[in-house]
Amino acid sequence: MKSSLFLALAGLLSANAQMPRPQPFESPVVHADRTVTLRFAAPNAKRVELSSQFTVGNQEMRKDEAGVWSITVGPVKPDLYPYNFVVDGIGVSDPANPDLFPNERFKASLVDIPGDPPLIHAVRDVPHGEVSYHQVKSAVLGATRPLLVYTPPGYRAGTDRLPVFYLVSGTTDTEETWFKVGKLNSILDNLIAEKRAVPMIVAMPYGNMMRGTPAPNSPQAADMYRLFSDELTKTIMPFVEATYRTREDREARAIAGFSRGGGQSLFTGFLNQDKFAWIGSYSAYLTPAVMEQRFAGICGDPEGTNGKLKLLWLGVGKQDFLYNDARAFDEFLTAKGIRHTSLTTDGGHTWMNARAYLTETLQRFFR
Amino acid sequence: MKSSLFLALAGLLSANAQMPRPQPFESPVVHADRTVTLRFAAPNAKRVELSSQFTVGNQEMRKDEAGVWSITVGPVKPDLYPYNFVVDGIGVSDPANPDLFPNERFKASLVDIPGDPPLIHAVRDVPHGEVSYHQVKSAVLGATRPLLVYTPPGYRAGTDRLPVFYLVSGTTDTEETWFKVGKLNSILDNLIAEKRAVPMIVAMPYGNMMRGTPAPNSPQAADMYRLFSDELTKTIMPFVEATYRTREDREARAIAGFSRGGGQSLFTGFLNQDKFAWIGSYSAYLTPAVMEQRFAGICGDPEGTNGKLKLLWLGVGKQDFLYNDARAFDEFLTAKGIRHTSLTTDGGHTWMNARAYLTETLQRFFR
């Protein structure tokens, strides 16, 4: 038995987690013409579909004699996309694909369709920074929580103090999502190599305040944003500034995030103008009511606010289910005379857009 | 619509990955009596089972009116265990559980049954080290590959040079498995806090040499181990020693690993006795044939070998499917007069045992 690789490997797997034997195929396979083939072994399933953000609606897959379902789609526009299989109605990540979408609730796989020239999130032959995982004790939340921190190429050997960008992920995302899906590290490695971004430290906290998930326009959302502001300023910033060589002036601190993280970033940036001069909102907003109630000082003093803010950046997709709310926030700022920069793109509330907005703002911060 | 949290969140999810709406329940839930409840929503499934390493065989789950399948098992012996659901024959990780088992082939979830006092892998209120993700360009493999590196508490503020432990994971595991499943960082944080281990740097490379998965006792396995030795000594060690404050004498270098990683560690340690004085094998072995053919010098000079090796440590479980091979290796070393330390435990080829063997060796290295 030991002489059989197949049995040996099946044994390893079954001993590890009693899972099915390894697939005798690869999935996904991205072809030269940018079509992609996906495969899933399920001899007894009645129906297997591909659910992805590179196809419109679910695509039915076909089963071969061996019970392996497959589909080839595309050519696909180069980008990094989430997908999963729907097996008789159940969402399943791709067992053959180690690249997973870190999330509290769903389990999707990731497929990268490379561009030519390579996209900005591709791992290129440039100096690489690193991403460090920390455990940080929070008196605010009464828990020890994870924090990821990117440092640029050469940081360990260097002596410079660097600006810090606090980057917050969205509802159901984890502290890993900006790293594993947002590709913050590769994007920033590439922008720094091209001198399109300045070297900076990027702290990626876990944005879930463990107080449920209030709707973005509910009063509870503003209370949760307030709690996040306390956690960021009382726990995370002191940890980052004690652990890394940071600049500690407001013009050397930025905050931005996607979805809930965008709301948290707007709220925290507005509430702590003495600490942040650069604010970004990706597919997010604050309601006019929250602005009037919580930030009367900002709404009533546009000149003072404009004098303090180096950048207030808003990005949203036309198909985003939050588009109308994001537009209302944008128009509110305009009506109040608060200077801001807006980018409206195609697409929805997706991480493809989140990466695009990140790439935009990384080139503007700290210059 | 936006005023409905449920629709807003469902919108977020569907926009993120077209996944089902979030479960209105938690899974897993570990109770005070160390029983654990697991839940999975599948209104249309015919049969849902729990497959885990804390139950013997698969356990059938029961469906409620809402179509949510659940089961409560235990009390469970405190440890960190992999599990998944088997939905009409398809293995599925737990959608409600963000803790996944990093692996190339299967997708299992992790549940931690806490002990009292807390187990050695628990996140305790002690100073914490950090784990850094690097991208390392390999001339040996012609690719840029991931590398994880643990540094102990206080490393960034310190000036000491530290010993380095190279820790290799097993077949189908990834470079993340020793971190996310092996809990190297928490175990070492706790051992260092209790002065049961010396502060050290731990480098966790990706052990897959991308040359298939030869059976552990095949000639191809030895060739793959040889390639790993080249990659470790020509790519990984130079990177680690250029990036971190390392001691660079052989008595300040250890290598160990689980399963395939154990074979790679034995082979690399024996082939590079000038570089390594501490070697550990967790649930692994080299065949007598490989020892005779590749390491005649070691087999023929036990005194010289014993004089060089500070520790040759072997651990295996009685139910491990590699147990007989591991025993044969142990007996071969004894017959040749090569000094070694053996630990035989209960259990199989599991990460519960891998963590136990890691904890043993961390207390012996570099003292």
Image (cartoon, coloured by chain):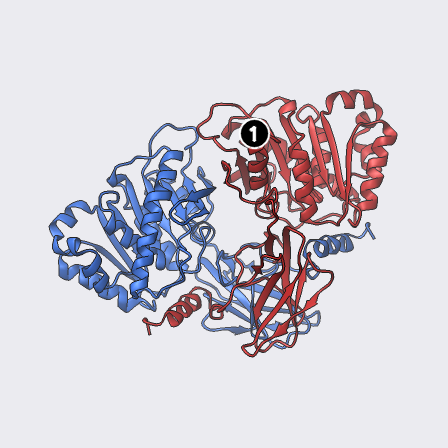
Chain colours: A blue, B red
The residue indicated by pointer 1 is B199
Rendered residue at 59%/75% (across/down): A88
Chain at numbered mark 1:
B
Q: Nearer the viewer, residue B18 or A276?
A: A276
**In the rendered view, would you say B67 is above or below B243?**
below
Residue A335: image location, x then y, percent: 14, 62
Q: Position of residue B178 (x, y in %)?
A: 61, 44
Where does residue A321 sit, x and y in percent of width and height?
34, 69
Q: Is residue B181 above or below residue B30?
A: above
Hey, what amino acid is under mark 1?
A: Pro
Q: Nearer the viewer, residue A188 or B192?
A: B192
The residue nearer to you, when weighing A346 against B51, is B51
Q: Quadrant of residue A10?
A: bottom right
Residue A284 is at least partly visible in this image: no
Q: Is residue B48 above or below residue A28?
A: below
Q: Nearer the viewer, residue A185 or A217?
A: A217
Residue appearing at x 23%, y 52% in the figure: A312
Q: Is any atom of residue B265 visible in this view?
A: yes
Secondary structure of the residue carrying numbered label 1: loop
Q: Residues within 10 Å of mark 1 (few under 14, many from 20)?
A: many
Q: Residue furthest right?
A: B335
Q: Give the percent coordinates (x, y) of residue B250.
A: 65, 23
